[in-house]
Image (spheres, grey):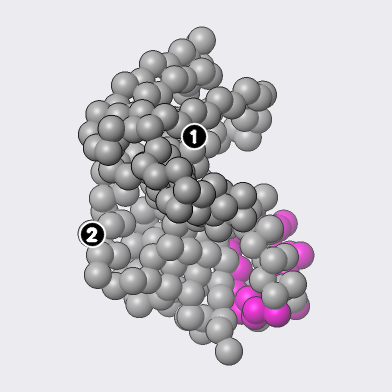
Amino acid sequence: MVKLAIVGLGVMGLRFYQLLKELGIEVTAVCDIDREKLEKFKGVVQNTYTDYRAMADEGGFDGVIIAVPPRYHVEQAVEFLKRGNYVFLEKPMAHDLEGAKKIYDVAKGKNRLFIGYCLRFNRLYREVKRLVDEVGGSPRFLWHIALGLFPQRGWIKDKSISGGVLNEHGSHVIYVFYWYAGPVRKVYANMVFDGEEVEKQFTVVLEHSSGAR
């Protein structure tokens, strides 16, 4: 039977735990720096930790779900990958390109790293992809607009942690466009910060090698 562990018991970590519970998949260990969150899991899961390295040392699981802010993805993903664990890493891959490359270098060729771009498995997006491939042919123009409140989680407003709103939130859309239209050859972008450290508004234009925009 597959056994999993979770690092990070925030919004996404708790969602993953509940989903795994519903699927009947055993979670043998959880980790979070917040001891109050861990208290709720004592006696529920086999082991609880405040240090992911201690959890990695003791093991007892086949794979780990990492659901912490992007800044901490690199050190944690690398740690578990080097130990041979399967790693499901919440998107985005890292808070900057250098960090993403470090993870890639360790994961390359091992088939043990999965990035949480969930729209790839959403029935609506999969059906659109099927129609594009089987009926419409190569896409020429893709458009997405999103309007909403500025993210309220404090760490998203710290670029050193989140990498910015486009990285943390907008990368979902960029992933879908890459999936639908293929590799990108040019990128044009404009951002408005309006006194914040991270962008409050942004426009991105992608030119794909296929000719799609």
Residue positioned most to the front: 135
Q: In this view, does 183 lie above or below 150?
A: below
Mark 2 crowdedness (10 Å alpha carbons): few <14, some 14-19, many ≥20: few
Q: In this view, does 110 lie above or below 97?
A: below
Residue 41, position as x, y percentages in the image: 72, 69
Element type at marker 2?
helix
Q: Name the residue under label 1.
A: 170
**Quarter in which the N terminus is drawn:** bottom right
Q: Is residue 1 left or right of residue 181?
A: right
Q: Which residue is drawn at 74% across and 72% down?
A: 22
Q: Is residue 31 part of the magenta span, yes or no?
A: yes
Q: Is residue 199 part of the magenta span, yes or no?
A: no
Q: Residue at x 55, y 84 (%)?
A: 2
Q: Which of 11 and 130 is in front in this view?
A: 130
Which amino acid is tagged 2?
A: Asp
Q: Residue at x 25, y 29 (%)?
A: 186
Task: Find the magenta span and give its range.
Answer: 24-43
Can you see residue 168?
no
Residue 86, position as x, y percentages in the image: 42, 73
Which amino acid is tagged 1?
A: Gly
**Label of residue 105 in the image:** 2
Q: In this view, does 22 lie to the left or right of 203?
A: right
